Structures are given as structure tokens and as C-alpha cells.
Image: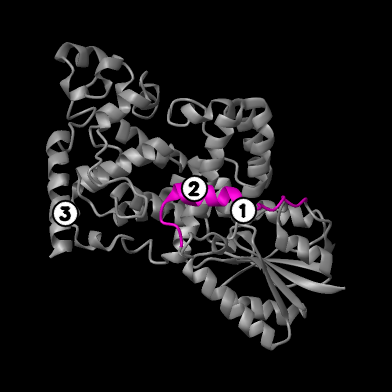
Amino acid sequence: MGKTIVWFRNDLRLHDHPALTEAAAHGEVLPVFILPEMRHAASDWWLHYSLLEMQQKFAEQNIQFIVRKGNPVEQLQIIQKESEANQVVFHEFYDGDSREQERELTAVLEKKEVQVRSFQGHLLVPPDAIFNKTYQPYKVFTPFWKSLRQEPIAQPLPVPELIPSLVQLDSLDEDQWNLLPDRDWPKKFAKHWQPGEDAAIKVWQLFEKKGLSSYKEGRDLPAEPFVSRLSPYLAAGNISVRSLWYETLTAAEKVGDEQTEAFLRQLAWRDFAHYQLLYFPNMREKPVRLEFEHFPWLPQTEQIQAWKKGQTGYPIVDAGMRELWETGIIHNRVRMIVASFLIKHLLVDWRVGLKWFEQTLVDRDEANNAMGWQWVAGSGFDASPYFRVFNPILQGEKFDPSAKYAKKWVPELAELPEKYVWEPAKAPADVLKSAGVTIGSTYPSPIVDHRAARERALTAYEQCKKRADS
């Protein structure tokens, strides 16, 4: 029997963990996590408490969960030497940095006759398993989805029985992780979330019971409890996407194929995002459609701060941005609306929004975030056309008809009659007075006129096309 290092990353769970299962079959288990060098405030908060749970789970089995910081390849070499482990296992990830680290680690350790094995435990199917008829990666989701549906998806694995390693190594204490920002802001997340594997399973069970049966229609209604709230758990790997896939298929007997199919498609969209990141590794920094390199973005102004703080004068936008700041998450429909507002109403480069989300989302996922922003900007593959400009007034009326969501997150409008909520600046003076609203004081005037902003965005798009063609 050997001794195996399990390199944990965004896969902080025990169930359906192929690398951990391999280690358990091989002999003694030595789980390791190397703290990332990049700081992302909101998701770092989530990571902190996910790591605490993992330490507790392993401690219950008399296993040391080692936390180090530094270059992962260097640290894993040191741990291998200290522990005399004869195998290192991990799950494959598909961003550029992760893949380079995996290649380098494998090359270095195999020279030392240490076995290195990687497994697919992050997505439904390996990205390199799906190609079109010309053996090129798909650029459109629907054919990708149809192809994925034909692929065998591995059955999820149970939690393995583990053999503790007798080796005890240096590990950073919790107060040395430096994952919790000095600011008080992330502390409020604890009112809305409990990170970790145990909580993830409970969230899934609640959604299966109360939300899945209305998911197809209800997922676009931010005031209703029909979304899964699983995205931060998937981002941290607290729950297995394959487990969700098979649980959803089983639930179809109760709630119907139409509802479960809609949820399965969302799981596949996550695969599609990582698929694109693999084949277009600069997706976070550069537009996938290169003609958007010529887009005439405006210089950054104070309007960006108004957008970040939820003070744009458009209630559906402000509600979304305030929900983000308070909870670390934003409803997916509203996420598209606020992104469209920044890009098309304010003509702000989509990368500004991407970076803000990276710091404020507890469900930060590099691939999902990049694909989402490029989808709204029109610069990604299978993206929303740039000339599709969300009207924030109509979007509020359509998806939050009772204004329940808007009034929750923009409480200064709570007493305003529903018919005036989406354009409070146009409400009669007596109505505003009765509701305790003073435009420009208690609630801002719109920072940009929708109609004028839409025309400006379309003009900018035409300029972009002309520059690309010239």
C-alpha cells in the first residue's frame, strides 16, 4: 500500500471526488490545499469557510488536511519529499494557469519516479471529448448541448473510506490564510450563506423540493424562490455537478421532463463556459470576436461608481447591484440586465464589469464570468447581438411585475405604487411626496436617458463594424 497526496483546488468536497477515491484505493491519504496567490474578496470568504469544513471532515477521520501557500508546483514537490508519497492525484481544470501547473508538476514528479494521475471531476464531460463534424470546438451552445447529451456522463462516486497518513507536516493555521478581508463588508454574507459540502447538499434538497417544479418559467423571476442558489457551491466544488445531473434526472419522475431539462441545460452551460475557456484561453482579457477590439468604449467616469453602488436611477439595475453587494450573488436574469446597462447604456468596457464581479461574487467562476460578460457584450461566440439593448424599465415590468424584488433591495421606493416604481422620476409630485421619495435626494435621477443611450450604443456598434472592415 502506498501514500498519496490529493491536491485539492476548486473541488472542496468528499463525495464524487475521483482523485480522493483513487487515493483511498492506493493506501494512506494526504490531502493538500495550496492557497491561491490572487485575491478575490467575496469568493475568498467562501473559500475560507469551505476549507474550515474540509479540515473538520478530515480531522474526524484522523487525517491532516494540509494548507500551504506559494507556488503549487514547488509546494507539492516539498510536501512529496517531506511525506515520501509515491503518488500525487488531482482533478483537471481548464484555465491556462491550472493546465500549465498540471503539466509542470507531472513532468517534475515523474522524473522522480512519483506517479501522477489526473481525473475529470470538475465538469459533466471532459472538454476534449466534444467536437463538431470537422473536429473543431463548438462555438454555439445548442449543438454543443446536443452533443453533450450523447456523451456518457460518469456516475457519481460515494464518499470513500480513507486511510490516514501517519505523516504530520507543517500546515498554515486559519489566521495565516489571509482569506478574510480586513473590511467588514464580507461579514454580512454569513446572514445569507453557509459555505461547504453539507450546506450544498441541503440547498439542493430544498431546491428539488420547492423550486425545481417551477424552474423553467420561475428562474427568470428574481422575486420568486425558483432558482437553485447552487452556483457558489459549484464554483467552490462543494457539490458535484455529476451528482446534480443524476439527481435531476431522477427528479423528472416527480416534476416532469420540461422542468428538469431546463435545469440540466444550465448545468451544461457551465460546461460550455469551461469548454470555451479551454479553447479560447484569453477569453477573460480579450473579446473572442476580434472585431470588438475596435469598439469605441468611453473613458471611465463617475457613472461607473453609481452603477457599482446601485445608484443609477433605474430600480431593476440598482436592486441587482445592491443585492450583489449585500449577498455576494445576483439573480441571473438581473445579472444580464445590469451587465447590459454598464456596457450599452454607459458604453463601459465589459472588462470593467468582469473585474468588479470577480471581487464581489461569492460564486466567482472565471469561465462563467468571462463568458457571461462577453455574451452580453456581443463579443463572445453564441452571444447576444450587441444591438439587443435591454430596456431596464421594461425588463423590470416584465420580470418583477409586483416590484417585490425592486422594493426589497431599493427600500426607499417601498411606498411607491407599483405603476410608478420603474420610472420613479416620472411619478406625479403628490405620489412621490406621499411615498416619501424625493428624486435627486432620497433616490437619484436616471444617470442616462434610456432612448438616447440606446441610440448612442447602436452608433458605437456601427463604428466598430466599420473599423473592423477597414
Point out the tag, 3 or 2, that comes first from the N-terminus: 2
Q: Position of residue 399 (x, y in %)?
A: 37, 26
Q: Residues within 10 Å of mark 1 (few under 14, many from 20)?
A: few
- Tell me the CA gap for discs 2 and 1: 15 Å
Which quarter of the rendered picture does the C terminus lie within?
bottom left
Q: How many numbered marks have been drawn onto this rendered protein structure?
A: 3
Cβ–Cβ under 8 Å for marks 3 and 2: no
Q: Residue 132 magenta-drawn?
A: no
Under tag 3, what secondary structure?
A: loop
Image check: 462 left or right of 180? Answer: left
Residue at the outermost front position: 133
Q: Nearer the viewer, residue 209 or 274?
A: 274
Magenta highlight range: 137-158
Question: Relative to 223, is 451 on the left or the right?
Answer: left
- Secondary element under disc 1, as helix, strand or loop, is loop
Residue pictured at 87% horizontal, 73% vertical: 1
Q: Which mark is residue 298?
A: 3
Residue shown at the point (17%, 45%) measured from the top left: 457
Q: Which residue is mark 1?
A: 151
Q: Does 161 appear above or below 195?
A: below
